[in-house]
Image: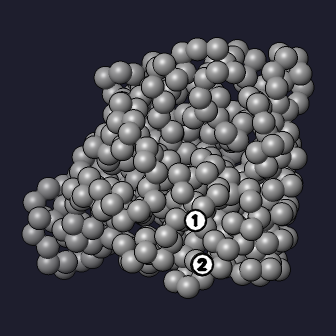
Amino acid sequence: MAVLLQALRLIDPQRINPPKNYIYTGDQIVAEKAGSDFSVKETIDCSGFLASKGWVDLRCMSGEPGEEYKESMESLGEVLQSSGFVKAVLMPNTHPAVQTRNEVQFLKSKSANWFSDLIIQAAATKDTKGEDFTDILDLNQEGVFVFGDGLNPISNPDRLMKILQYLQKFNGILFDQTYEPLLALFGQIHEGFTSTRIGMKGIPNLAEDIAIHKNLEILRYSGGRLHFQTISTKGAVEEIRQAKKEGLQVTADISLYQLVFSDEDMMGFDTNLKVMPPFRGKEDREALIEGLKDGTIDAIVSNHQPQDLDAKHMEFDLSLFGMLGLQTFLPAMVKLAEEISWPLFISKITDGPNAVLGQQSDKLENLTIFDPEENWVFDKKSNRSLSSNSPWHNTELTGKVKFVINKNKFVKI
């Protein structure tokens, strides 16, 4: 069934193109041309909407198996679809961790009917503890090529080096949220003026900077492909920028909410704002934006980490890290749209992450269509997640995904 998308403005990494008609044929999206021989069954007026290639998230989390009450695989699939994402990388931090063929096969069966394509990140060390290796080669036989310990940094230099060497056997890639755990020990928010004023143990920039530097030195020695996840400091951006100039196979992403909030927002002790890495200072934020613009930072992620009410509704220092990030992803971009252009945003959630994964394609076979001006309330009724740990819960937001196409699948949100 062909669908005519009328007066659609398509965003590419260079520009927002003028309105044009496109036809979804059932397996691809093509520009309408005079004399096109398509039997159009439905026409959708896309005036006022924007669209781009389908969005890709390199970092999201499910609670299943083990903590399905936070986010089941079924609910995560619904959240990804309704948020405009056609592809997502799933972190391994479940109970048990994703570390054997059994867990990989379980997740594949659970996501078999998803609208979005799932890429499974398997644990690089057993139980993501950074000690004993998982059977990396055996997991690769199950189709896994992304490895890492998800929420936990691989801080042991020997383990990091050997994992990078193992992954070169099949061109795998190591994802790492890099920081030095002992320097971040007991830390709750960014170490700075705000942490001092409110008497909260801080996490210094040094915890991230020194670990990034160390891991890049190991990468220089061992070779391989290393992707830094959710970097947050000016020093990290500078280290990665220099490494790229030297030709190292290194990439990086940031959490979108790092650009929306700063450590000054922690004055209210809102546990929904407690994330890792923490919101940094203004100088770090400016460095992240510059890193996006000059290509140092390859992708923007949702860092979607559902937490149940009990994990957040307690004393700040006892509450768990993490924030919902998928359904509020577009509204967060809208909040920043005057500062960061739509073409730049789109490049960091389409071509950028696809390049990290080695899955670039010039074909327009998926599409995310959205209204950047529609207002809606993010509340219990509209929330597709099983958790509600977001500072924007029960507030009105601007920006709504309207339609998503992924190959032969078309949904109206």
Residue 206 image position (x, y, % from top left): 88, 47
- Residue sitting nearer the eye, 16 or 217: 217
Callout 2 crowding tier (Cα within 10 Å): few <14, some 14–19, many ≥20: some
Q: How many marks?
A: 2
Residue drawn 54% across and 57% down?
126
The image quadrant of residue 285 is: top right
- Labelled disc at residue 133: 1
Q: Is residue 295 visible?
A: no
Mark 2 and mark 1 in contact (Cβ < 8 Å)? Answer: yes
What residue do we see at 31% from left, 23% from top?
381
Residue 271 in the image: above or below residue 81:
above
Instruction: Please state which amino acid type lies under the numbered disc 2.
Output: Tyr
Circle nearer the viewer, 1 or 2: 1
Of residues 228 and 1, the one nearer the viewer is 228
Q: CA distance from mark 1 to mark 2?
A: 10 Å
- On the image, the x and y values in percent for residue 50 come to 43, 52
Question: Which quadrant is the N terminus positioned in?
Answer: bottom left
Secondary structure of the residue carrying numbered label 2: helix
Task: Give the residue pinned by disc 2.
Answer: 166
Residue at 75% from the left image edge and 17% from the top image edge: 267
Residue 285, placed above or below residue 249? above
**Left or right side of 346 for 37:** left
Residue 58 is marked as: none
Secondary element at tag 1: loop
Residue 230: percent from left, percent from top: 66, 51
The picture quadrant where one finds residue 165 is: bottom right
Q: Residue furthest front?
A: 132
Amino acid at dot 1: Phe
User: Which residue corresponds to the image point at 45% horizontal and 25% vertical from the top-left?
Assistant: 308
